[in-house]
Amino acid sequence: MTNVNLKHLAKELNLAVSTVSRALRDSYDIGEETKRKVMALAKKLNYEPNPYASSLRKQKSRTIAVIIPEIANNFFSLAINGIEEIAQEKGYHVLIYITHEDYNKELSIMRYLQNGRVDGVLMSVSSNTDDIEHIINLKQRNVPIVFFDRICENVETAKITTDDYESGFKATEHLIQQGCTNIAYLCISKHLSIGNKRMHGYLDAIKKYKLRSPQTNIVFGSNNHEENYNKVKKLLSAKNRPDGIFASVEKLALTAYHAAHELDIHIPKQLKIISFANLETAPLLKPSLTTITQPAFEIGKRAAMTLFRSLDKKNAPIINETIILNATLIPRESTRK
Amino acid sequence: MTNVNLKHLAKELNLAVSTVSRALRDSYDIGEETKRKVMALAKKLNYEPNPYASSLRKQKSRTIAVIIPEIANNFFSLAINGIEEIAQEKGYHVLIYITHEDYNKELSIMRYLQNGRVDGVLMSVSSNTDDIEHIINLKQRNVPIVFFDRICENVETAKITTDDYESGFKATEHLIQQGCTNIAYLCISKHLSIGNKRMHGYLDAIKKYKLRSPQTNIVFGSNNHEENYNKVKKLLSAKNRPDGIFASVEKLALTAYHAAHELDIHIPKQLKIISFANLETAPLLKPSLTTITQPAFEIGKRAAMTLFRSLDKKNAPIINETIILNATLIPRESTRK
DNA sequence: AAATAAACCGGAAACGTTTCCGTAAAAAAA
DNA sequence: TTTTTTTACGGAAACGTTTCCGGTTTATTT
């Protein structure tokens, strides 16, 4: 009923609280005999130290925070999976915060974290954060941050990401090689580094192959699904509608599928589609979807590992590095000639 | 750099720590003038109270734990989404733990939670836990538990779930009405209440329509994807292979799809498939998948709400009730006549 | 035998809050 | 004016750990 604590154990064994504490941590200057007695009673009473008392005293929480824009998304689910695996291995607890792509939520969440609640943060920034003051603030309060996927270029810390530029280039090149000459690019925000990198890859590929300038073929989506659908539908209803689509996130590929079906545009005959995606169902779609697949699980793991490397060394500063894990292009029917 | 605390503020303002504390909580017996001063300085220095000191003193953590078997699964992602939304509204923090369908992990996770780390737990049990001692233990230590989806029948607490029996019945009935006479049932564990309920619905439908006994048509999968694939393939390779499949989880529906494609069995002509699923891509599959879709987001929300209802009333005991949210059957091509 | 070292353990402070209790000054009531 | 109440604040204890600083005993060395 009432939780058992050190004082409890101490009284029962006629020992001092400090002795019990050290016995449990197997301290060198406690006798073997007492150690055994203490451990035995602790086990019997199912003693578990109060984490908050411990955190308060040690100024360490053994907890990390994961901040992500959304969770109903295969990439982030898989990343969390990787993070949680490493955290559990290291005996850390993981708090999860979802910003819902909302800058203000991101702000208030990070305020909560600034006073010792967590030892470190893994984050993927929201799509509409363009200033980084709140991030710098947190970092200055000595809570280390590691970015994954949606990184912040100008914060000095470790960043785990994929070869976005190259993948963007390859995706576009793939469409061109499959015969597309009028390729559209779909992304969700102007602010995101990954979106921009992928777009640069796209633009450079367009340039290299001397296709016509795609000014009007770039669609910036939003968080609003309806809106995105209408934009894509409009794109596909235009007179000179694209014959290829490169979607920078899987959600937009699906809206493109829906729009194409609605408009009776055949994939891949009339429209080829390639997309960044971690969809388990990509090979089962009608038609199966050509994807650029990021190693999401691995990215999560690596992010967690680099954070813990710093935490293990009593907060050694995190190296300002960018670790790039390659995405792989998996050609399927949606881009077949 | 160094974190600002109450002592800090007190010294700066020539006040006692207690005064500052009460001023910040807008206590009635602090003068308006001092309140203003304190608030102003706190804001200026970006003061954020140390959560662990507060938790220790108040014996409340404003944190809940979510324990789920896996996260790379649309149902659980959506449920977490709902949970997180309510938690954020209530100013609670959410710790996440993944058991990976491992009873022992579930055990050790729940040990961590028994000494005040969280004020309450939302959980969906692992597929291979059949004893519930660890759950009872936690409950006896005064941490309230609410189950969602994968509930534990014989723990007295609130349970949020779907109409599994009825849905199982309806799913089977739907297959029968679409012309199936030899229907197989795919599930992941013998221990899960939801699996059993769905199975009972299935069996009762079979009985009602006087189809032949489906002893050999029930496949118990596991956590091993390869293994499941082989079992399903074997099922579909048999002489009297089924003409209908009812999958109790979306993962197994996908393996059925893969197996059918591999064996060149046409869906829905030679094999109709219906499945419990929260797949966003269900309408885009080849063929589009008939699903029983649970209101995952709502389930998460309701679970969180019933937990918070208890927490708000200073740990009023949770009513032993079962809240059932209906799943909806969405017919698509995979079960077309 | 005396001095030193080693082995074991207790007391108390500290982490940063919150809250109980007490008290001085000011205001109100007598 | 005296007494009581109210207002506004300070002091200190408490939450449960961990850890610093000791201090006995016993064993070892000189």
Image (tube, coloured by chain):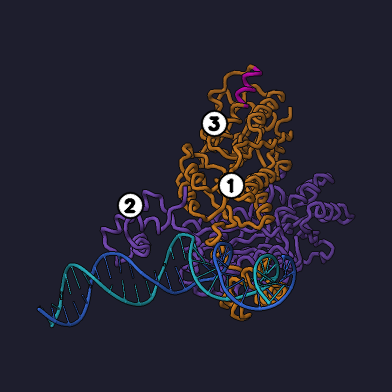
Chain colours: A orange, B purple, C cyan, D blue
Quadrant of residue A90 in the image?
Answer: bottom right
| Mark found first going from the N terminus, 3 or 1 | 1
Q: Is residue A145 left or right of residue B5?
A: right
Q: CA distance from mark 3 to mark 1?
A: 29 Å
**Which percent across, then down, holds residue B334?**
72, 49
Question: Do marks 3 and 2 share a subunit?
Answer: no
Q: Which residue is mark 1?
A: A122
Within 10 Å of the Cα at label 2, are there few (<14), some (14-19), or many (20+) other Cα atoms? few
- The numbered mark 3 sits on a residue in which chain? A
Q: Residue at x 53, y 37 (%)?
A: A155
**Which percent across, then down, holds residue A285?**
70, 41
- Residue B149 position (above or below residue A179): below
- Residue B244 position (above or below residue A259): below
Q: Is residue B325 left or right of residue A26?
A: left
Q: Residue at x 26, y 60 (%)?
A: B32
Q: CA distance from mark 3 to mark 2?
A: 45 Å
As shown in the figure, which amino acid type bears the numbered disc 2? Ala
Residue B19 is a magenta residue: no
The local secondary structure at tag 2 comes to helix
Say which mark, if any, is on residue B40: 2
**Which percent across, then down, holds residue A103?**
47, 43
D1 and B83: which is toward the camera:
D1
Q: Which residues are magenta?
A: A201-209
